[in-house]
Amino acid sequence: MLGAGCVINSTKESVEDRVMEMTDGEGVPLIVDAAGIPGLVPEFLKLAAPAGSVCLLGFSPTPSELSQVEVIKKELTIVGSRLNNNMFPTVIGWMAEGLLDTDKLITHEFPLEKAPEAIKLIENNPQLVRKVLLNIQ
């Protein structure tokens, strides 16, 4: 689980029902979208707690549907981030110390010459991919 306290398989149960059950109907104070799947934005807004924040990190050229009523009635804060490259030295240190098991982050590995195949996998099956490693050896 990579440190997660709870994992919800959206193919087997309703994320909204499970989150609301776990939070006594309040929702989540912070939602971080690292996937960049536009269709999930409306769900994030429903899952957010009043005065909560939604941070968008994932990149997609496809527009997202945004329900202004959800944002306004809950007084949500929506922020975008290009990530925090100032954290790179810290995270690299964690990796060197063995505090992060990076092997669990990589779900697929391809030789560099198969990069187009790797990109197609990411684009066409994002639910199967956590990280793809292109091996340049």
Image: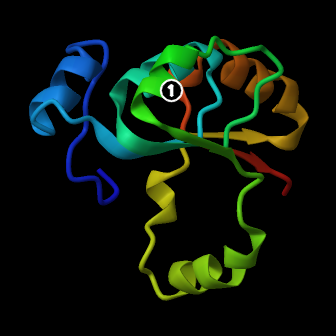
Residue 114 in picture, x, y percent from top left:
83, 30
In this rendered view, identify the residue nearer to me: 98 or 110: 98
Q: Residue at x 74, y 77 (%)?
A: 86
Q: Residue at x 68, y 37 (%)?
A: 58
**Secondary structure of residue under mark 1:** helix
| Residue farthest right in this picture | 113
**Where residue 78 appears, x then y in whole percent?**
60, 40
Is residue 95 visible in this depiction of the protein? yes
Please indicate whether residue 64 sits to the left or right of residue 106 in the image.
right
Q: 66 or 133: nearer the eye? A: 66
* Among the 4 quarters of the image, the one containing residue 132: top right
- Residue positioned 77% across, 25% down in the render: 60
The colour scheme used here is rainbow
Q: Is residue 114 left or right of residue 110?
A: right
Residue 3, image quadrant: bottom left
Image position of 137 (left or right of 63):
right
Q: Measuring from the top left, give residue 13's x and y in whole percent.
A: 20, 15
Q: Quadrant of residue 34?
A: top right
Residue 56 visible in image: no
Q: Quadrant of the C terminus?
A: bottom right
Q: Considering depth in this image, is 106 or 34 the residue closer to the camera?
A: 34
Residue 6: percent from left, percent from top: 21, 44
Q: Which residue is mark 1?
A: 72
Q: Badge 1 local density, few (<14 within 10 Å), some, or many (20+)?
A: few
